[in-house]
Amino acid sequence: MSSASLVSIAIVAVAVSAACNGDRPVPVTAPDLHECDSRGSDSHTLDARLADTSRAIDVARRFLTVSPATATIYFGDVQAFTATLTNNGAVLDVTSSAKWWSTDVSVADVSHGLAKAVSLGSAGIVAEFDQRKATALLTVAPGGPVAVIPSTASLPVGGTQQFKASSAGQDVTASATWSTTSPAVATVDASGLATAKAPGITVVQASRQGSVGTATLTVMATTCALTIIPYSVIAPIGGTQQFDAFCTGGGKTVKVTTVATWTTSDPAIATVDAMGLSTALSSGVSQVTAQHQASTAKALLTVQ
């Protein structure tokens, strides 16, 4: 019922009330209201009509809204919706209390207001609270072009480079599928982190929703200058010490601890594992050596 209709009913009701109570005559036309006599015999009918009008006004002032009213996302993405109840001008967030469902679960599913795109198409996202319902329209569109950042990179053997994927202005690194065209040159994991394996050039690819973004990765053959940190350290018997190896070449310094080869000059005094972690065994001095490519670096470990 429109606001104008509610006001009209209220005006008619007031006019009839005046006539029924012997007040100054007022012209009244209300086909669906009984004509009252001089004693106001139809006052009960009038009271009922006034009560109905009051309830209709309350309904008009209390309504549920879902926002945003419309949204477009890409396959695999999510969209948060909010349900609010407006009651006589007061607005209450009822997102967590409302009951949610999708009109087409093959396109999108929703839980507690969070909708996830399942396939291309459109679906209504419905919220229900206090016997009231509201609906928003969610459209699942094909994914946009994918860009890989940075578009070019250079690394020494053993170095790493973090790549990111972007689509429609959003970071989609986590939802992209990563690969390289030459795994022997470099590999890339599910998070976009590439590791240089051997000299050469490879293409890093990020695929998402049928779109593919690429970057060029060059692995340098330049021999690097190797250093170990710390250079000299004292450890107690039974203690451990972490050594790290760094390779400087081509204008970059790269941590190569996990790809270097580690040894000690006297395993009876101290040992070192493949990750550069040494263990002090007996008193004395031992050299810790790291080798990477054609470079070698040494550090001193004194066990006391």
Image (cartoon, grey):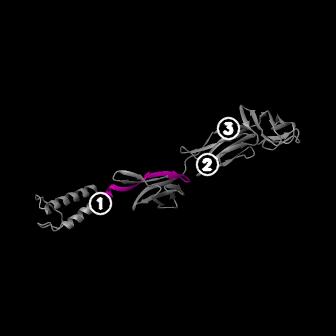
Q: Residue furthest top?
A: 251
Percent coordinates x, y for residue 235 in the rendering: 81, 38
Alpha carbons under labels 1 and 3: distance apart: 68 Å
Percent coordinates x, y for residue 68 in the rendering: 44, 51
Mark 1 or 3, which is nearer the eye?
1
Mark 3 or 2, which is nearer the eye?
2
Q: Secondary structure at mark 1?
A: helix
**Quarter of the N terminus within the rendering:** bottom left
Which of the two residues, 277 or 126, is positioned nearer the viewer here? 277
- In primary-sequence order, the first of circles 3 and 2 is 3
**Quarter of the C terminus within the rendering:** top right
Which of the two residues, 141 or 232, is positioned nearer the viewer here? 232
Residue annotated with mark 2: 174
Residue annotated with mark 3: 153
Instruction: Rate crowding at label 2 as few (under 14), some (14 to 19) or many (20 or more) other CA atoms within 10 Å.
Output: few
Alpha carbons under labels 3 and 2: distance apart: 20 Å
Residue at image position (47%, 55%) is 138
217 w.r.t. 225: above or below: below
Q: Which residues are magenta?
A: 54-79
